[in-house]
Image (cartoon, rainbow, N blue to C red):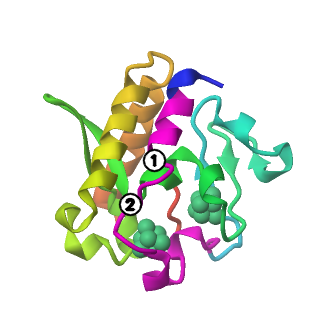
């Protein structure tokens, strides 16, 4: 396990998007499988080692198949920062709302300021840490590039993973 990934995951272990359990607002919408019962969340390079092989759909990148819930300590990195995404700006990596989350996340309508500041700050620190790792930075850029394509399509899909 890469130290950067281990630390980034740990930064988000005890913070939540809002004070309280936001899953009660939406019936844990972001943990529900899609219409085909597939679901799945991108795993960062090296993150597969946290999970049993049977839970992972191989591919480029491999995905963790959703089972409806995860122990907080076991969630993939991209679930830990949902509904945020890290974007490289001229001032460094910054967090903004992931456009894919509009389809399912009630927190989106309150905007970035509606999220707990500690959550957003921890997510930004974690993304900066990952981006400082030359082997993980290209993956973050790839993830952001895929999200950008959703700015141009109808935001009605329920597939919430960062694919
Ligand atoms: S969809 Fe949004 S509000 Fe619902 S559990 Fe996920 S992050 Fe929280
Ligand atoms: S992988 Fe993520 S989205 Fe899927 S069940 Fe676990 S926490 Fe929820």
Position of residue 13 in the picture relative to residue 98 (left or right):
right
Q: Is residue 162 visible?
A: no
For residue 71, side relative to residue 113 (left or right): right
Q: CA distance from mark 2 to mark 1?
A: 13 Å
User: Nearest the camera: 93 or 122?
Assistant: 122
Coordinates of residue 22 in the picture (x, y in percent): 43, 75
| Residue at the (33%, 54%) spot, across then down | 119
Residue 142: give x, y in percent of width and height.
Answer: 43, 35
The quadrant of the rendered image in which ligand 2 is seen is: bottom right
User: 35 and 74: which one is in front?
Assistant: 74
The local crowd at label 2, few if under 14, some if 14 to 19, many if 20 or more residues have their Cα within 10 Å, is many
Q: Is residue 30 magenta?
A: yes
- In this rendering, position of residue 108 left or right of residue 83: left
Nearer-N-terminus badge (2/1): 1
- For the N terminus, the image quarter is top right
At mark 2, the secondary structure is loop
Disc 2 marks which residue?
83
- Res 40 quadrant in image: bottom right
Q: Ligand 1 closer than 8 Å to the CB at disc 2?
A: yes
Q: Which residues are magenta?
A: 5-34
Name the residue that disc number 1 marks.
12
Q: Which mark is residue 2?
A: none
Residue 135, percent from left and from top? 50, 18
| For the residues bearing labels 2 and 1, Cβ distance under 8 angstroms | no
Residue visible at 34% across and 57% down in the picture: 98
Q: Is mark 1 within 8 Å of ligand 2?
A: no
């Amino acid at each position: 396990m890469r130290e950067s990934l281990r630390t980034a995951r740990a930064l988000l272990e005890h913070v939540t998007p809002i004070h309280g359990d936001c899953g009660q607002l939406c019936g844990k919408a972001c943990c529900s499988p899609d219409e085909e019962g597939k679901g799945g969340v991108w795993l960062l390079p090296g993150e597969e080692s946290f999970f049993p092989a049977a839970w992972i759909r191989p591919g480029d990148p491999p995905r963790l198949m959703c089972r409806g819930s995860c122990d907080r300590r076991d969630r993939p990195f991209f679930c830990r920062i949902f509904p945020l995404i890290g974007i490289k700006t001229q001032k460094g990596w910054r967090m903004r709302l992931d456009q894919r989350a509009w389809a399912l996340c009630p927190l989106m309508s309150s905007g970035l300021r509606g999220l707990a500041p500690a959550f957003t700050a921890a997510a930004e620190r974690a993304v900066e840490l990952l981006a400082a790792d030359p082997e993980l930075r290209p993956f973050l850029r790839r993830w952001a590039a895929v999200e950008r394509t959703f700015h141009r399509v109808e935001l009605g899909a329920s597939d919430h993973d960062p694919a």
